[in-house]
Amino acid sequence: MGRKLISSDEAVQGTCQHTKPCSDCPFSRESLPGWLGGGDVDDWVRAAHSDMVLPCHVIDNMQCAGAAIYRRNVAKLAYPPNLKLEADRETVFASPMEFKKHHDIFLKSA
């Protein structure tokens, strides 16, 4: 398992687009629950279901591979210049409900 709790201030320059989620990707099932940077769960879900380009917070100047896989998992059509990757429901959440259940501390205490 890769390093966790990496902030965008620690991002390294990328030389080619990665195709697997980073060790710390919020869209990965291996992510630390609640580790969402400055946004809340609903902000992340809205962004993932929008047409905006989502940058990787670990590799500077690259798109988030986890978000691209999540979008494919939920059948969100990614318009260029958004990254398109294959579905992977074992590694990345397959629905907004799964994402929310994993990251929302209020859902965990209910």
Image (spheres, helix red, strand yellow):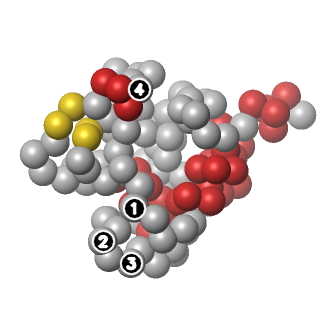
Q: Residue furthest left?
A: 15
Residue in the foreground of this view, choosing between 61 and 4:
61
Answer with mark 2 or mark 4, whichever residue precedes in sequence. 4
Q: Residue at x 31, y 53 (%)?
A: 63
Q: Which mark is residue 81?
A: 2
- Quarter of the rendering containing residue 40: top right
Answer with mark 4 or mark 1, whichever residue precedes in sequence. 4
Q: Which residue is mark 1?
A: 53
Q: Are marks 1 and 2 in contact (CB under 8 Å)?
A: yes
- Quarter of the rendering containing residue 68: bottom left
Mark 2 neighbour density, 10 Å: few (under 14) some (14–19) many (20 or more): few
Three-letter code for the amino acid on which mark 3 is drawn: Tyr
Q: Secondary structure under badge 2?
A: loop
Three-letter code for the amino acid on which mark 4 is drawn: Ser
Instruction: Give the Cα separation between the discs numbered 3 and 2.
Output: 6 Å
Q: Position of residue 71 (x, y in %)?
A: 47, 65
Instruction: Give the Cα separation between the discs numbered 1 and 2.
Output: 7 Å
Instruction: Give the Cα separation between the discs numbered 3 and 1.
Output: 9 Å
Q: Position of residue 66 (x, y in %)?
A: 40, 51
Three-letter code for the amino acid on which mark 2 is drawn: Pro
Q: Secondary structure under badge 1?
A: loop
Q: Secondary structure under badge 4?
A: loop
Q: Which mark is residue 7?
A: 4
- Residue 41 against residue 58 in the figure, above or below: below
Three-letter code for the amino acid on which mark 1 is drawn: Val
